[in-house]
Amino acid sequence: MLNIALFGPPGAGKGTQAKRIVDKYKLVHLSTGDMIRKEIANGTELGKMAESIINRGELLSDEFVVQLIANSMANNRGAKGFLFDGFPRTVAQAEILDKMLEKEGAPLKGLICINVPYPELKRRMLERAKIEGRADDNEEVIERRFKEYNDKTVHVANYYKEKGVHKDVQGDRTMDEVFDSIVSILEDLQ
Ligand code: AP5
Ligand code: MG
């Protein structure tokens, strides 16, 4: 089993690269952001609980997202591996994920950190706002998402550095160039 996480600030290109990686390696893509947006679009109870929080650019509770991930993993028994996108986003989430993967006997092999300078991240999200109309892609909420990232999420990188599975990728290049770098990391990990 090949279990990998894509990590990086809002707008780094996690979702973009995830699509390409799952196509090539036949992994199951688990994006907590996509799962939450789907719950909201379907008008479920979970979606109602999450909507105002995600629209303010704040993180949902660890319990909430861990439950989403646990359910999706259970629904995909027999997968060749999971590609986590936007999860884990706190050290508490990372510790829980590690316990879940330990039970599968297949620990996280790589945390791939996509690094992009702040002005480019902001430019990408404001550009995406024109195309996709995501409720959290506006100046005020983008700032809040960066603050949450810097306060709570960056520590996850250090947590996995200590475990020796952290890998850096320069993300302010073309999508193809970023993908090639990720592929060369994954080829080494397999
Ligand atoms: P989530 O959906 O995970 O959003 P995010 O981390 O803010 O990241 P984005 O999806 O905005 O960016 P991305 O890195 O996927 O970049 P993309 O490929 O789209 O989370 C949303 C919210 O959900 C959170 O704020 C929180 O409320 C909640 N949440 C989710 N997970 C949670 C968790 N674990 N715990 C608690 N709360 C959670 O690319 C961005 C744009 O740039 C696109 O338009 C793309 O076309 C373009 N682009 C990509 N790559 C390139 C490139 N190389 N060159 C030029 N343009 C590019
Ligand atoms: Mg995304």
Image (tube, helix red, strand yellow):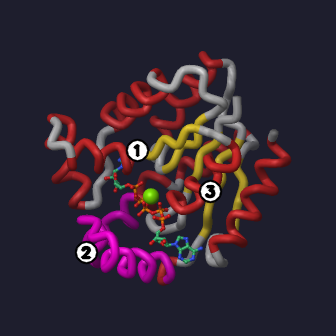
**x, y percent for residue 56:** 22, 60
Q: CA distance from mark 3 to mark 2?
A: 30 Å
Observer-nearest of 60 and 13: 13
Cα distance, mark 1 to mark 3? Answer: 18 Å
- Badge 1 density bin: few <14, some 14–19, many ≥20, Cα 10 Å: many
Between circles 3 and 2, the one closer to the viewer is 3
Vertical arrangement, residue 58 with respect to residue 70, above or below: below
Is there CB contact under 8 Å for labels 1 and 3? no
The verdict on residue 133 being magenta is yes
Disc 2 residue type (three-letter): Glu
**Can you tell which mark lies on residue 32?**
1
Region of the chain picked out in magenta, as a range: 120-148
Figure check: 141 above or below 83: below
Q: Residue at x 72, y 54 (%)?
A: 167
Write down the residue under mark 3: 20
Rate crowding at label 2 as few (under 14), some (14 to 19) or many (20 or more) other CA atoms within 10 Å.
few
The reply to whether the C-beta atoms of the residues labelled 3 and 2 are less than 8 Å apart is no
Give the image location of residue 69, x and y in percent. Answer: 43, 32
Say above or below: 156 vs 55. above
Q: Is mark 1 within 8 Å of ligand 1?
A: yes
Q: State yes or no: Cβ of the residue under disc 2 lies below 8 Å from any atom of ligand 1.
A: no
Residue 140 - label: 2
- SS at badge 2: helix
Q: Is residue 189 left or right of residue 55?
A: right
Q: Indicate which quadrant contains ligand 1.
A: bottom left
Q: Is residue 50 left or right of residue 85?
A: left
Q: CA distance from mark 2 to mark 1?
A: 22 Å
